[in-house]
Every structure is written in structure tokens, then in C-alpha cells.
Image (spheres, rainbow, N blue to C red):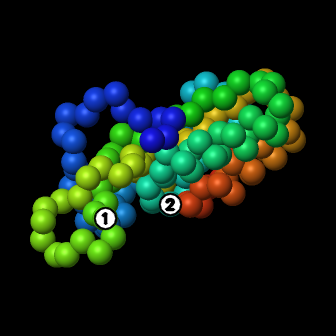
Amino acid sequence: MGLLQPRKVKHRKWQKGRGRNRGVESRGTELAFGSIGLKAMEHGWLSVREIEAARRAMTRYVQRSGKFWIRIFPDKPVTKKGTEVPMGGGKGAVDHFVSSVKPGRILFEMDGVLKEMGNEALRLAANKLSIKTKIIER
């Protein structure tokens, strides 16, 4: 599996939750570590692969200078049944993990780079994500 993954979970399989897109984030809405950050503007699930691709895009652009913080963690298991499996037969096996994101959540933070460089790095990272985001500064 991917890089980010919980060591252990209380329940192996979770219920999906109805896609009501309710509410905005109340926690993790302010920059806590860096001077520039990427903020979610809509609901969505961010997979381990998306988070990792965004992280790679950022680190590659700034050539490993500065410091990064990933403010989300994929702790929600998503199950999947095999192809051509008939109806019934229970719930599928855990396939991957996602992070459930609400509008207002800070996804990534960055410090120790020039403003223009940080903006561009976060823009490249935002292109890897499946939700709308915006770059914010302290």
C-alpha cells in the first residue's frame, strides 16, 4: 500500500457515510506551522496517492529546501470488491485509505522558501488533488 497508512484502526471496515457534504471544518483552519499553506475549498476524499503526489510535486519544485507540513492523514478505510463479483457475499476487503476533507481545512503548510517559490510549489501540489483549493498566507 501507500506511504501514509494507519498502524492500527479500531474498526477494520467503516461505513461509507451518506454524501451530504455537510458543514465546514472547525479544526485545522489556521496556519499553525508555516507561513504559506494550501486550504481546501470543497468537500472530498483525498487518497494516499493524491497526498503523496502533491508532496512529491512540492519537494521536487523547491529542491528539498524549506520545510513542509502535511496537516491531513488518511485514516478512513475504503473497501472494494473484486471485478465480476456477484451481488451479495458481504462487504469487500479494504482497498486503500482516504482523508475526508471539509472546506476550510489546511492541507499543506510550507516555510523557509521565497514567497513566489512557495506559491508555485503549492500550485503544483494543488494540481495533483481532486478538490478545489486556495493558497493562503500568514
Q: Position of residue 56 (x, y in %)?
A: 69, 40
Instruction: Inspect this view and state whether residue 49 appears.
Output: yes
Residue found 29% across the figure and 75% down from its top: 84
The three-letter code of the residue at mark 2 reads: Glu
Q: Cα distance, mark 1 to mark 2?
A: 30 Å
Q: Nearer the viewer, residue 22 or 90?
A: 90
1 and 2 marks in contact (CB < 8 Å): no
Query: Residue 15 sits in which quadrant?
Result: bottom left
Label 1: few (<14), some (14–19) or many (≥20) C-alpha neighbours in 10 Å: few
Q: Work out which quarter of the rendered image holds the N terminus and state it.
A: top left
What's the residue at 65%, 55% (across, down)? 128
Front position in the image: 104 or 128: 128
Q: Is residue 110 above or below residue 45?
A: above
Q: Is residue 105 visible?
A: no
Q: Residues within 10 Å of mark 2 (few under 14, many from 20)?
A: some
Nearer to the camera, 89 or 69: 89
Report helix, strand or loop for mark 1. Answer: loop
116 relative position to 46: left or right: right
Label drawn at residue 42: 2
In this rendering, is residue 107 above or below 79? Answer: above
Q: Dividing the image into 4 quarters, which one contains the C terminus?
A: top right
Disc 1 target residue: 82
Question: In the image, residue 75 lies at what x, y percent?
Answer: 36, 40
**In-front residue for pair 103/51:** 51
Residue 8: % across, % down: 28, 29
Q: Give the vertical position of 16 relative to 118 (above or below).
A: below
* Residue 134 rendering spot, x and y as whole percentages: 65, 53
Report the side of 120 relative to 2 (left or right).
right
Counting residues from the start of the chain, the first of labels 1 and 2 encountered is 2
Q: Residue at x 39, y 46 (%)?
A: 97
Q: Which SS class for mark 2?
A: loop
